[in-house]
Image (cartoon, rainbow, N blue to C red):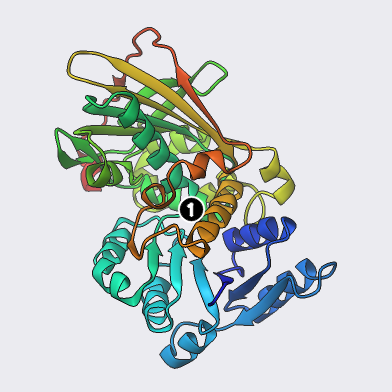
Amino acid sequence: MKTRVMLYGVDEYVGTVISREIAGKGFAHIAAGQNIARVASLANGLSGKSPGLVEPRIFGFGDKLRLAAQLDDVAILVNCYPRFSAASEALIEACMTTGTNYLDLLQERLTFESVFELDSEAVKAGIVLIPGLDFNICGPEIVVSRLATMLPSATDLTLAISPSPRSYAEASALVEACRGPGERLLNGELVAANPGAQQRHADFGQGDVETWLAPWRHDAWLVRKTGPYTTVNSFEVLPSSLIRIAIKSGWRRWLFRRGKRLPALARKISGRGEGPSLRKLKTSRCVIWGEARNADGQITRARLETPAAEIYTAEAVLVMAQAILDGKVAPGAHLPWAACGATLVENINGVFWRELPDGSEVETSDLDLPSSVAAS
């Protein structure tokens, strides 16, 4: 029986952080990627005090036979490229061939849908497919599921996210997402919504904080697939530089919509380098505030606090990998919460769930954004 775990994509920021974090817990794994120098440097550094703890492997995904050969002794492959969906199809095909379970951190709706289309094939192959094993998917999914249990009659859901410091890749994705409309769930239908078109204050544990409508998030699609809610709005704390340029009216937003100086804005949001240091991540937190409301006006609120997104994701990888190796996840395609449930809260250090007493009504304000925003 195969028991080895491979992280593919350690030659990029997120994969590097996850590999370092799980190696620090003594978890032996294969660190794989396409950049020879970066993969070798990471593996050698992590194995310096514990020889054999991290094995390097370098390969691409263009050659199907070679790719399958790299996975022949692997029980679980974790695709750590959060926005590199081109690799997922080839990796999943190789996993089907070799009987390797597949996890990824992808955050693209089309990728989710393509994975779930392979559910019956995964069952036949006897493997598990779990997309979105990332804080940005796991965190909201936890809040959605628990609020539904607390107030089963709820139809309206509001989520607000206070993220940890962003990497350059995350900042770039955020900047790009704010250039055009996203979607929210309204009365059971996915409808177009402009980034920042609404504001809401949310209490992340230290008083009310201003958040902005974030229709680029996948919460609406996830809820429509798994939850009881018919209306879903997602909000997020945004950097002041992005608010000034991308959301508030003026000539800067006009230039922003046309793609001017986007890399410079992403660098300003993320700071220097690829992303925060591991030391900084260790002291950072993510918080998700949620509110469920039913037709009778009953309101339930709760708050999920976790370590920084990358640290939480590393912990979630360990929890999910152990559950699969223990035979606790049935073959097929699953979202993380459906596969592991409460263990994604209870088995991860530094995760806190707080049910909040009803407070005074908080108003949501709409910004007067021109209709041309949706078309630009």
Q: Amino acid at mark 1?
A: Ser
Q: Which residue is mark 1?
A: 172
Q: Quadrant of residue 22?
A: bottom right
At x 35% / y 65%, what residue is drawn? 331
At x 53% / y 15%, what residue is drawn? 207
Side of 306 relative to 54 (left or right): left
Side of 188 relative to 7 (left or right): left
Compared to residue 200, the image places residue 221 above or below, namely: below
Foreground residue among 374 and 62? 62
At x 49% / y 46%, what residue is drawn? 135
> Could you say whether the residue bearing mark 1 is in a helix, strand or loop?
helix
* Place of residue 253 in the rendered image (x, y in percent of width and height, measured from the top left): 37, 40
Foreground residue among 123 and 277? 123
* Place of residue 27 in the rendered image (x, y in percent of width and height, measured from the top left): 68, 62
Compared to residue 160, the image places residue 97 above or below, namely: below
Compared to residue 204, the image places residue 343 above or below, namely: below
Q: Residues within 10 Å of mark 1 (few under 14, many from 20)?
A: some
* Place of residue 84 in the rendered image (x, y in percent of width and height, measured from the top left): 44, 67
